Image (cartoon, rainbow, N blue to C red):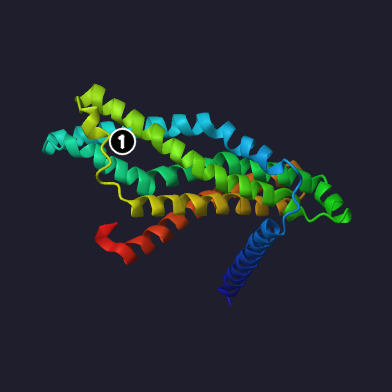
Amino acid sequence: MAIRPYLERLGAAALAALGAAVELWLVFVGTIAGVLRGGRPRGAVIKQMHVIGNKSLLFIAVTLGFIGMVMIYQTCLLTTQVIDGRNQVGPQYARLLVLDFGPTLTGLMLATRVGAGIAAEIGSMKVTEQIDALRMSGVAPIDFLIVPRFLACVVMTLVLTMFGMAVAFATGGLTGYLSFDINPRIFFSLEQVRPIHAVFGLSKALAYGMAIPVISGYCGLRAKGSSEGVGWATTAAVIGSSLAVILLDFLISTIGLLGFGANL
């Protein structure tokens, strides 16, 4: 009998998680349907592209730039202690950057900044009953609030991923040249990068760009109460979006390894 309360709580938690998953799926389906229907407010997507993309440029550049510098420094340091393989650092780094490092790190950074912003904005509208007013006016909240952010995030995640990779590659090459005297012509070689790497890297960026606004918008729509509810929605959006990036990275990488194996 003592175990019964624990089983009841476990069952309740499982049912709540299942219900949340179904609601999230419905938001995703509604978002895709809204994209296909069209009818978005004029200029809404462009505005969100500016908010998501332009205002994230410095954040992405600083983050990927410094992490790229640290990665190259540590890699070269360890390489020179065992065998002098500095000539292979650049080409292998470019392959890793395109295939996984660039898209995933960019996605995680956008999950924190963009995810939190979307959830806070929509959550504030929810607790102040502005979303109820939209419904009363015959406007679907998903079409009005999530769809423009969805389209903007998909486009700008791809753009920011390529921008971030370029910054990380440049700062890595600069670190290799100044600290370990690696010839820039050797470091910036793309001989290890193949089209399949770019396909999988951009596929990850596309998946992240789709997941972040949907999860964040869903969390914002679930906000309740007052400022405390908005805080919960923001926290849940960052955690959920970051977790989605990691899981999607694992899933797409697994598909790539199973399909292409050592060729990837």
Of all residues shown, which one is farthest toward the left?
Answer: 83
Image side of residue 124 versus residue 87, left or right: right
Q: Quadrant of the N terminus?
A: bottom right
Front-most of residues 44 and 221: 44
Callout 1 environment at 10 Å: few (<14), some (14 to 19), or many (20+)? some
- Whole-percent x and y of residue 251? 42, 61
Residue 231 seen in this snapshot: no
Residue type at mark 1 is Met
Q: Which residue lies under the disc numbered 1?
A: 71
Residue drawn 82% across the image and 54% down it: 139
Q: Is residue 4 above or below residue 60?
A: below
Question: Can residue 61 be seen here?
Answer: yes
Q: Residue at x 25, y 22 (%)?
A: 178
Task: Look at the numbered disc 1 and give the secondary structure of its residue.
Answer: helix
Q: Position of residue 101 (x, y in %)?
A: 38, 44
| Residue pictured at 30% horizontal, 63% vertical | 260
- The residue at the point 32 percent across, 62 percent down is 257
Q: Residue furthest right?
A: 136
Out of 218 and 42, give the one closest to the viewer: 42
Residue 8: give x, y in percent of width and height: 62, 72
Of residues 225 and 42, the one nearer the viewer is 42
Position of residue 16 in the picture relative to residue 91 (left or right):
right
| Quadrant where the C terminus is found in the figure | bottom left
**With respect to residue 142, does 130 lie above or below?**
above
* Vertical arrangement, residue 170 with respect to residue 28, above or below: above
